[in-house]
Image (cartoon, grey):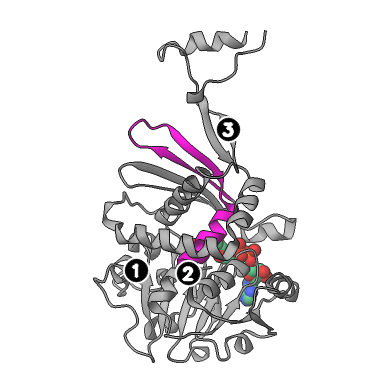
Amino acid sequence: MSAPLPSEKALVPFVSVENMMRLVHHIGVETMLVELTDVIEADFRRWELFDKTPRVASHSREGVIELMPTSDGEIYSFKYVNGHPKNMGQGLQTVTAFGLLAEVSTGYPVLLTEMTLLTALRTAATSAMAARHLAPKGARTMAIIGNGAQAEFQALAMKAVLGTDHVRLYDIDPLATEKAARNLAGFGLTVTVCTTPEAAIEGAQIITTCTADKQYATILTDNMVGGGIHINAIGGDCPGKTELHRDILLRADTFVEYPPQTRIEGEIQQMDADYPVTELWKVISGDAQGRRDAGQITLFDSVGFATEDFSALRYVREKLKHNRFYQELDIIADPDDPRDLFGMLQRAR
Ligand SMILES: NC(=O)c1ccc[n+]([C@@H]2O[C@H](COP(=O)([O-])OP(=O)(O)OC[C@H]3O[C@@H](n4cnc5c(N)ncnc54)[C@H](O)[C@@H]3O)[C@@H](O)[C@H]2O)c1
């Protein structure tokens, strides 16, 4: 005899990769990046409310697997995410993710979703959020060093949120640059393919580094970076994995998400424990200064923080109220009598 169909209480909306792709196109990728930037910023404004902890990381020689939890007291979220720079050589992605939202009052999940695409979108939106407070006014040109999975999202978020209209691309692998240039055609950006990092940053007011290498890499050296630049460093996000020469950090004003996590994982792991940083949420809420003057070097030492995923997950949940880009998954056991779990098991006999 087959088991009866699961009840409403057993079902949790699940957004597959296919449905996420449909949702992004339904909303429009640039609109979604703008909306995500706003919801992430809104949650940065209520930063103090959130439960915060450095993410829980399980390191191996090849990479890292991380869990990123947070809660605002009403809703809880976590993301599972990996970072394996060598995966690409096996035809696998460097970063994959999925995540969940739950109600704090019952502990019941209310959304389960793919987050590989959503992470790329929220990372780009967070970059744009930081840049709108830190980049030189009227920045039109950005450079992207590292043209892998994150690159196009980064380019489009800066365009949609800040109005940059020129992107200069460089990757050690010319095929990656070719791919990014091809994907960015038709979005109204001038795309320049560069063959050296020095050429890529020429004339750029915003430099995004999003390379993946499990080592202390030096994507930018001190002599490459002049004044009046905003650096958005997203690829240094793990112990032993950085992108900037430390001398740049000595000249830059550094802005971070959650200092206890960034001091372990970010570019500032190269610096002493008292290296001064400004928390981005304070800039956003007006408690700290962002860009001070036109000649300053600002650095967003991005590592990715759990509240950004929380915001993105809540955004998706909100969108699902009006669109059916999800399936219902039977993931919560629902016995007739809550104490009769064993009895429920007999339904499938
Ligand atoms: N801060 C965050 O919130 C956040 C979020 C997602 C990903 N990341 C990180 O961003 C980085 C990029 O992620 P991805 O998914 O695009 O990875 P990816 O593997 O798809 O792309 C990385 C690219 O960097 C290039 N590269 C490696 N070394 C280079 C060098 N020395 N100079 C120029 N290019 C170089 C590679 O050829 C590749 O094309 C990773 O390190 C990842 O961990 C950070």
Give me the residue at 59% from left, 62% from top.
Answer: 29
* Residue 132 makes an appearance in the image: yes
Residue beneath disc 1: 280
The numbered mark at residue 127 is 2
- Quarter of the image with the N terminus is top right
Residue 189, x across and y down, in percent: 63, 79
* Residue 240 makes an appearance in the image: no
The numbered mark at residue 328 is 3
Residue 63, x across and y down, in percent: 58, 55
Label 3 Cα crowd, 10 Å radius (few <14 / some 14-19 / many 20+): some
Give me the residue at 67% from left, 57% from top.
Answer: 87
Label 1 Cα crowd, 10 Å radius (few <14 / some 14-19 / many 20+): many
Q: In this view, does 58 lie above or below 31?
A: above
Disc 2 to disc 3, C-alpha distance: 33 Å
Label located before the other in sequence (2 or 1): 2
Q: In which quarter of the image is residue 15?
A: top right
Label located before the other in sequence (2 or 3): 2
